[in-house]
Amino acid sequence: MKMDNDKRKILRLLCFVLSGLLVMTVSASVYYSLSMQPSMTISAAGVAFKEGDDWNSSWSMGTNNTWCSLSLKAYPNATLTYEQPLNLTNTGDSVSITLVAISISPASGNAQVSNFTFINFTLHSDTGLVMGYLNYTTGGTNTWSIDSIDPVNMGTGDEWYITIQTKAAAGAQASIVANIVIAVDVQE
Amino acid sequence: MPLSAPLQPEFLGILGIDIFLALSMLTCIFDFPVLLQYVYHISAFVGFGQLWINYVFAFSEETRFLICLAYLVIGLANIIFINGYIGSRDKKILWTTALLCCITIPSILISLSAVSCYVNRIAISLPLFPLIPPEAVMAILLMCGGILAISLVVSAFVPEFHGSSVSKKKREVKDR
């Protein structure tokens, strides 16, 4: 009887060992497979646009405030300033941001370019300090000269504003339109 | 080339699985009730099923951590209990000390360091394993359950047949 029990015990132990080895190996492999799965979470953009105090109702703000479209004017030989048309908010972690030129038309080389003197985008902190800029100037030529500065840090909860200044050449033709696409480059 | 990756909460669950498997073997070696041995072994399977549940229900990382931590703590508590019970039942200091030094204390230390690594986001090098699709986890779990069921049947019946027929015949031969 004792021998039977011993055999039974040894057999049971052997089953436990084999079954345990299988579970251990497979669970380690499953863990490895799960941890190597790429994962991606969709969340709202931390840095987003917001309508400023001088926002015009005819302008459009895109979905999730990640883009906007503004129609601006320029007067010949007079500087037109939009004080606070657009704000920039950061609801996420602290990031580095900068204004980046994407495209402009008429492009450099087009004779219409000389109708403009400058189109300046300036980024101000909530206290009014200049944090960045993106300046398009022509100097009366057919070539755009683009100037910007290095990225600056934007803290969590900050709300900055963008000032836009435009000026057309003294003898500029009316109804000349410039389409400018700029972006806010956010480095996390 | 090993890959370095921060620990996932399931790593604690895998430690718990290993602890329960060790418990099932320990209780078998030290002649604990058979039911308890299988309870520990099935607990290891439950831990493995938990990997699948975490994947399917996609709990938040905090919830997964709490579930796995609870499972690990239960496993450690059982190791301490078994160690203490063997010490009080058998009154063998050598066995108790050996279990304490070889199993109980290392298990606790490894578990604490794993929890610490997870909380502090320390990257651990993992050897390269073949990748198993997560969808196959349920099938693997069922396969392991099947193997356990077979082992139950085998360990319950085979020695009885073996002992009743062969050993009795040998005994009869010796008697003659």
Image (spheres, grey):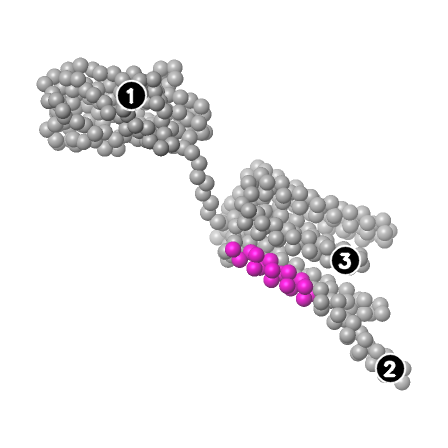
Chain identifier of the residue bearing label 1 in the image: A
Find residue A97 and report its image quarter: top left
Q: Dot 2 corresponds to which residue?
A: B172
Magenta residues (range):
B135-151
Q: Main secondary structure of the magenta part?
A: helix
Chain identifier of the residue bearing label 2 in the image: B
Find residue B162 and report its image quarter: bottom right
Looking at the rendered structure, the kind of residue marked 3 is Leu
Q: Nearer the viewer, mark 2 or mark 3?
A: 3
On-image quarter of the C terminus of chain A: top left
Q: Dot 1 corresponds to which residue?
A: A56
Q: Position of residue B28 (x, y in %)?
A: 76, 59
Chain identifier of the residue bearing label 3 in the image: B
Q: Position of residue A36 (x, y in %)?
A: 49, 49
Looking at the rendered structure, the kind of residue marked 2 is Glu
Mark closest to the chain's N terminus, 2 or 3: 3
State the CA–CA distance, disc 2 to disc 3. Answer: 34 Å
State the CA–CA distance, disc 3 to disc 1. Answer: 77 Å
One can see residue A172 in this view:
yes
